[in-house]
Image (cartoon, rainbow, N blue to C red):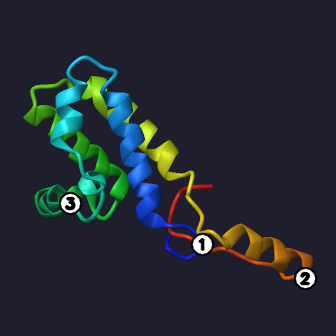
Amino acid sequence: DDTLWDLVRTMQRAHQEWAADVREVPGGEKLAEANPDWRSWTDASKVFAEIKRDRPDLGKDLTLIRREAMRLACVSHALDPEVFVERGYQVWTAARNRPIFFDSTLELLTNLKKKGVVVGVISDGFAE
């Protein structure tokens, strides 16, 4: 994140795609309106801190914490989490795993490859 691709723009797009998708489900409009900020499903949100405090059983697993944040958002708006959480998480994650590269990234990597430089990547994430 923020090395080869723009984390903020990638997360903003993931949130926009999530919001567009949940709006297609009856009741989803109020869920999307109540969570307009891309930080809603990230470590930067207040609810993440609350979940980490109240649910130590989730540890530092951002996937579980993110799903719980989505579940709590549904419950607070009297929406069925079974309808929204898995679907919303899948849409958000698919968009999050399509990073928006910085302008010169692909050109840089192509030039390194042409020069025979082998680049390795180490990540703590789950995206391919």
Instruction: Please tell me which of labels 3 and 2 falls first in the chain.
Output: 3
Q: Is residue 8 above or below residue 69?
A: below
Q: Secondary structure at mark 3?
A: loop
Q: Which mark is on residue 45?
A: 3
Instruction: Say if 67 sits above or below 24 in the image.
Output: below
Q: Is residue 89 visible?
A: no
Q: Which residue is nearer to you in this view: 40 or 111?
A: 111
Q: Residue at x 37, y 38 (%)?
A: 18
Q: Residue at x 11, y 58 (%)?
A: 54
Question: Mark 1 and mark 2: span between their CA atoms?
Answer: 19 Å
The picture places residue 95, in percent across and down from the top left corner, at: 50, 46
Left or right of residue 49, residue 61 in this image: right
Residue wearing tag 2: 115
- Residue type, label 3: Ser
Q: Quadrant of the C terminus?
A: bottom right
Q: Residues within 10 Å of mark 3 (few under 14, many from 20)?
A: some
Give the crowd class for mark 1: few <14, some 14-19, many >=20 residues within 10 Å.
Answer: some
Task: Write the residue at 20% across / 24% down.
Answer: 80
Front in this rendered view, residue 104 or 115:
104
Q: CA distance from mark 3 to mark 2?
A: 43 Å
Between the residue at mark 3 and the residue at mark 1, the CA separation in whole angstroms equals: 24 Å
Front tag of 3 and 2: 2
Dividing the picture into quadrants, the one containing residue 88 is top left
- From the top left corner, tell me how far across and down residue 119 is, in percent: 76, 78
Question: Please, what is the three-letter code of the amino acid marked with disc 2?
Answer: Lys
